Image (cartoon, rainbow, N blue to C red):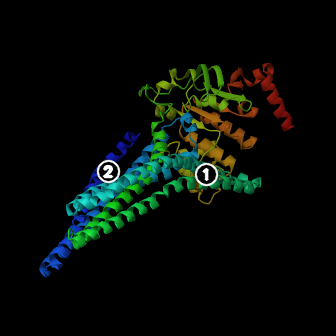
């Protein structure tokens, strides 16, 4: 699992190496200071040698300053390495998500992906900094201080060597117990983020249905659940501190007792005991830092596992067997014995056979749940057919480079999505190089130009997140214009005029018919009027093709089509 993260270190390998090197230098200098202090007491002061005291004191100051410089440099390099590593992991995970197919994205909730890109990466980033500094410093300090203390009095060293196994066993038990609990806690954090995100996205619906109290109760449950699991995880971790304190102070008391007796017996100097206690403090502090690192590692291990799930996820749709030189300029489409199912569910499309000629306009109509949207999503490989073949220009869509295929196919999806930015910036998603004249023409064809110009800033009007400051019908028209700017060989309109009135719908269809000559057009609609002038209309029922024909033919021969038509005519009447 950790191997997946090694590539993200490459860019910052130099500061990653320099940070521990400087921290080792700091440790080497620090462990000399107590020894110099003992010499001042046992040699300089004992012999009343002022010059020795001053010279040794100056050495201590010099070592302290050098240790400070090494520590500062180590902290700087560790920060650069850690923040850089976190940035690279975040970029890598985000890029991996961008390569996911719809099927891959369906496996993870949006809230969970947001948590992994933020909280989980922050945990890993902080742990990385701690590992290249603290996890290097503490073991080196531990070993170095033990060696120096052994030189002073090997017998006294046995006191805290006996304490080490107690700490080791305690830490192992705490780490093992806490890991599972932190994993559950992070899942509860996902649930909380999901609740918040859902509420904020649907805040207008919440207010319209006066469901604020229900949402507050729902949030309180998720929040309390997270708190309960957080406390459950933390109450294991907090045992670490008291255990460390107990062992640390018990060890110091024991050393002062045995050391004091040695001084009385004349087998140890006073300065040596002072120095020894300083080394014991360094050793025990190192052990405490290692225990804190264990806590961080436990938390980051859960986060690493969650990030690894994304990095390990293999995109269902890839360019693995694609040929880069194929183009979709021949815009004919053919479905050959196509069936499709979502995950392990039942088939939602069953044995679809349909041939669409280049430049033909096809209408698709059917009841809710008849898989109209699923059918057209197979053309641009948003999903792959589970059985059969989808051909564009006589070539299986799986043989196209994904980017190459989607450049030739424009889709106005059922859910209209706009992004933060100006109207012009949103429209240029269709073609970043589009001129103002091309943008205006596309907007006129989509009946969007007039309402855009009604805004004080026109095409430079800023849209909030999701286009909250425009109506549903205006969103649809902007999305149609965005698709037209792309100048595609194939255009798919998935119920894209449902939020506009019938008169505007008719104007858009008339403009598109004129502007999209030679373009293969697929129109999914609920209204018969939106597809009545199509070259052919496909009637879908329960994932199967029920009938294909012109508007007149279907009115004569197809019961489903007649029923829909008659019900809509009664509604008009």
Left or right: 450 as drawn, with respect to 244 = right
Quarter of the picture containing the N terminus is: top left
**Residue lying furthest front in this view?**
265
Residues at marks 2 and 1, CA–CA distance in whole angstroms: 34 Å
- Mark 2 and mark 1 in contact? Answer it, CB < 8 Å: no
Q: Which mark is residue 192?
A: 1
Numbered-mark total: 2
Q: In this picture, is 464 found above or below 411?
A: below
Q: Measured from the top left, where is residue 506 in percent x and y?
A: 72, 38
Q: Quadrant of residue 411?
A: top right
The residue carrying pointer 1 sits among few (fewer than 14), some (14 to 19) or many (20 or more) residues within 10 Å by Cα, namely many
**What is the secondary structure assignment of the residue under circle 2?**
helix
Q: Name the foreground residue: 436 vs 500.
A: 500
Q: Which mark is residue 12?
A: 2
Left or right: 108 as drawn, with respect to 173 = right
Q: Measured from the top left, where is residue 414 in percent x and y?
A: 65, 39
> Which residue lies at the image location 64% right of the left edge and 42% below the top edge?
415
Left or right: 303 as drawn, with respect to 273 = right
């Amino acid at each position: 699992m950790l191997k997946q993260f090694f590539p993200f270190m490459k860019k910052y390998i130099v500061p990653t190496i320099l940070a521990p090197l400087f921290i080792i230098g700091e440790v080497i200098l620090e462990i000399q200071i107590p020894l110099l202090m003992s010499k001042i007491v046992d040699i300089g002061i004992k012999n009343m040698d002022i010059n020795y005291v001053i010279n040794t004191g100056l050495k201590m100051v010099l070592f302290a300053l050098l240790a400070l410089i090494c520590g500062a440099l180590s902290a700087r390099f560790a920060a650069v390495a850690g923040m850089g590593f976190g940035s690279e992991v975040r970029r890598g995970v985000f890029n991996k998500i961008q390569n996911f197919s719809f099927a891959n994205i369906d496996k993870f909730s949006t809230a969970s992906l947001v948590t992994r890109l933020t909280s989980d990466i922050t945990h890993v980033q902080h742990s990385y900094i701690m590992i290249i500094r603290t996890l290097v410093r503490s073991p080196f300090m531990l070993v170095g201080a033990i060696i120096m203390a052994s030189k002073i009095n090997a017998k006294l060293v046995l006191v805290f060597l006996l304490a080490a196994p107690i700490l080791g066993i305690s830490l192992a038990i705490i780490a093992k117990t806490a890991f599972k609990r932190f994993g559950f806690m992070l899942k509860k954090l996902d649930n909380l983020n999901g609740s918040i995100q859902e509420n904020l996205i649907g805040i207008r619906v919440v207010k319209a249905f006066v469901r604020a109290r229900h949402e507050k109760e729902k949030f309180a449950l998720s929040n309390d659940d997270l708190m309960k699991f957080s406390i459950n995880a933390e109450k294991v971790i907090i045992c670490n501190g008291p255990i460390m304190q107990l062992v640390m102070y018990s060890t110091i008391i024991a050393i002062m007792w045995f050391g004091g007796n040695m001084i009385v017996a004349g087998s140890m100097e006073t300065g040596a005991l002072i120095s020894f206690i300083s080394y014991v403090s360094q050793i025990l502090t190192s052990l405490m830092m290692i225990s804190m690192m264990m806590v961080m590692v436990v938390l980051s291990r859960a986060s690493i596992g969650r990030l690894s799930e994304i990095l390990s996820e293999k995109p269902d749709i890839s360019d693995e067997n694609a040929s880069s030189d194929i183009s979709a300029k021949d815009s004919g489409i053919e479905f050959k014995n196509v069936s499709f199912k979502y995950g392990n569910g039942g088939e939602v499309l069953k044995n679809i056979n349909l041939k669409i000629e280049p430049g033909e306009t096809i209408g698709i109509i059917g009841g809710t749940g008849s898989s109209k949207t699923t059918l057209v999503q197979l053309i641009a490989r948003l999903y792959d057919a589970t059985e059969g073949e989808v051909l564009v220009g006589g070539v299986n869509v799986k043989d196209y480079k994904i980017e190459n295929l989607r450049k030739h196919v424009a889709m106005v999806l059922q859910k209209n999505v706009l992004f933060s930015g100006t109207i012009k910036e949103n429209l240029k998603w269709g073609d970043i190089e589009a001129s103002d004249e091309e943008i205006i023409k596309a907007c006129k064809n989509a009946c969007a130009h007039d309402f855009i110009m009604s805004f004080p800033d026109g095409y430079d009007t800023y849209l909030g997140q999701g286009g909250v400051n425009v109506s549903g019908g205006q969103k649809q028209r902007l999305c149609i214009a965005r698709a037209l700017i792309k100048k595609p060989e194939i255009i798919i309109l998935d119920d894209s005029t449902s939020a506009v009135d019938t008169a505007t719908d008719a104007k858009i269809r008339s403009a598109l018919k004129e502007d999209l000559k030679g373009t293969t057009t697929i129109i999914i609609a609920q209204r018969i009027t939106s597809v009545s002038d199509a070259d052919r209309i496909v009637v879908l029922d329960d994932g199967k093709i029920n009938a294909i024909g012109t508007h007149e033919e279907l009115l004569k021969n197809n019961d489903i089509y007649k029923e829909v038509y008659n019900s809509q005519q009664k509604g008009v009447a």
